[in-house]
Image (spheres, grey):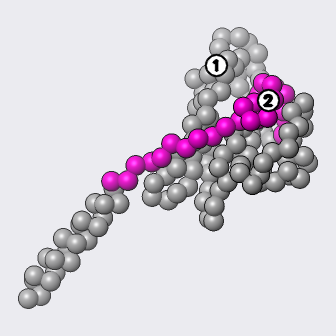
Amino acid sequence: MKIKLFISLLLLAIIACSDDNNCANINLNATSLETEYECLDTRYQIDINLSNDYTIIRNQTDFDNLVSGSCEPTIDFSKYDLVIGKKGLLNGNSSIDYQLVENCKTNNLLLQVTFFQNETTEAPNLTYHSLIPNLVDEQTVDVKIIVQ
């Protein structure tokens, strides 16, 4: 009887654990100040006092106090959190691409920021950003930088 119970519990544990491995990460929609608020090329038009780092801004007061430049929108922080950072690069930049992914096991977010470089000798210190859906509870967001 004990052996049957042990085998049943073992099979149940294996089945339960295998279900956790079948989840798939979810691609989420992120947007930008250019798209939502008609700002122009924010790589060069907004600034924040950071160096190869990022922060999350969750209200208009912090945005107004921390971000400067020609783009001064009133952001709908009831809908979005703003991930914003700076990246120093060794040569010119053609564009930046953003991909936001939610981890299916932890519900935490990963924002992948890809800088597409060109051959110019310019060495810019660019501002990058993404408006993401509001973080909930203990949810976090990490930023992964890729330079191509």
Q: Is residue 110 visible?
A: yes
Mark 1 or mark 2, earlier in chain: 2
Q: Residues within 10 Å of mark 1 (few under 14, many from 20)?
A: some
Residue under circle 1?
A: 117
What mark, if any, has residue 125 been given in the picture?
none
* Residue 34 within the magenta-colored segment of the rendering: yes
Identity of the residue drawn at 65% across and 49% down: 133
Q: Secondary structure at mark 1?
A: strand
Occupied quadrant, residue 147:
top right
Q: Position of residue 85 (x, y in %)?
A: 74, 40
Horizontally, residue 121 falls left or right of residue 2, namely right
Q: Is residue 55 visible?
A: no
- Which marked residue is nearer to the observer: mark 1 or mark 2? 2
Horizontally, residue 120 falls left or right of residue 17, namely right
Which quarter of the rendered picture does the C terminus lie within? top right
Horizontally, residue 83 falls left or right of residue 71, namely left
What mark, if any, has residue 38 been given in the picture?
2
Identity, as a three-letter code, of the amino acid under mark 2: Glu
Q: Position of residue 13 (x, y in %)?
A: 25, 71
Q: Secondary structure at mark 2?
A: loop
**Residue at the bottom extreme of this rendering:** 1
